[in-house]
Image: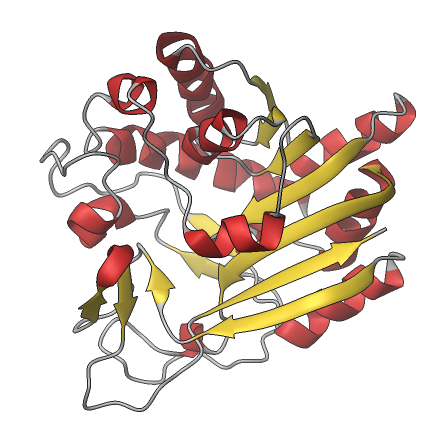
Amino acid sequence: MTIDLHEANRLSWNAATIAHNSHKGDQAAFFRSGGTTLFPEELDLLGDIAGKELLHLQCNAGQDSLSLAQRGARVTGVDISDEAIDFAKRLSAEALIPAQFERADLFTWFEQARQQHRTFDRVFASYGTICWLSDIDTWARGIASVLKPGGQFSFIEFHPFALVFDEEWKPRYGYFKDGPIIESGVGDYVAQSGDTLAVDTYHTGTENFTNPHPSYEFSWGIGEVVSALVRAGLTLDRLVEYPYMNGWRAFEPMRELDGDRLAPPETMPNLPLMYGIAAHK
């Protein structure tokens, strides 16, 4: 584990979160009116969560957490970013949707939760999460340690194969990588994606955002992720691949589908752009 790189990512996410939320308008009003940021794929992997104690890993600024709480779950969200957690707490209060938010490095949080014997019915993580974590086995063991017997883990992530391409669909990165990838900082992917990631309608907000803090990403192949979960004692129930991305306009050009989904242009073959996992303890 390289917690110092996690700390660098915390600073980068603090800066980026301000830019991201500047594009999303009156989010509290959106949620008070019954709005949700969840896609059908997450709901399918999660199943019925009403009345469940649900841990949302790397919850960012809490929009998905509140969407989960609206479906009846008792939600605890954890994220490394001070700015994201502060925003999530304000949003919860203003939207009148109860949820608990805790700021911590995820690996530190797992250790503290084990010591305090905290457990959950469901653990959930989605979209651009594990690339910020320096050790996939620590992540998987942490999930297993806070799941109740019979508890379920639901996970959806951008496909590591898609991330071998640069923004113009040119192969740039190897699928198998050792060590962190140094980036110029967490970017403004909400501005890049426009309406497909705006909570209500897209607002101009911060323009030409440049992150003053570098970031460090880690690449985990599907085999590494599944193997880590199995080593941690979880049983795999489903592994699903999807030929589109939900919300994120990662490449140019992309073809817009219904429901804020994005796919490669018709001149390209189908590619796996996301994958989902359901597992239980």
Q: Nearer the viewer, residue 159 or 132?
A: 159
Q: Residue at x 42, y 78 (%)?
A: 164
Q: Residue at x 49, y 70 (%)?
A: 159
Q: How many marks?
A: 0
Q: Residue at x 57, y 61 (%)?
A: 218
In the image, residue 271 sits, relative to residue 146, either above or below, namely: below
Q: Is residue 188 visible?
A: no
Instruction: Left or right? Give the position of 113 relative to 276.
Output: right
- How far from the left and from the top, in percent, is residue 226? 73, 68
Q: Is residue 118 visible?
A: yes
- How far from the left and from the top, in percent, is residue 270? 35, 86
Q: Quadrant of residue 73?
A: top right
In the image, residue 122 sits, relative to residue 66, either above or below, namely: below
Instruction: Left or right? Give the position of 273 relative to 254.
Output: right
Instruction: Left or right? Give the position of 255 relative to 83.
Output: left
- How far from the left and from the top, in percent, is residue 234? 84, 57
The colour mode here is secondary structure
- How far from the left and from the top, in percent, is residue 182? 46, 59
Q: Residue at x 35, y 78 (%)?
A: 165
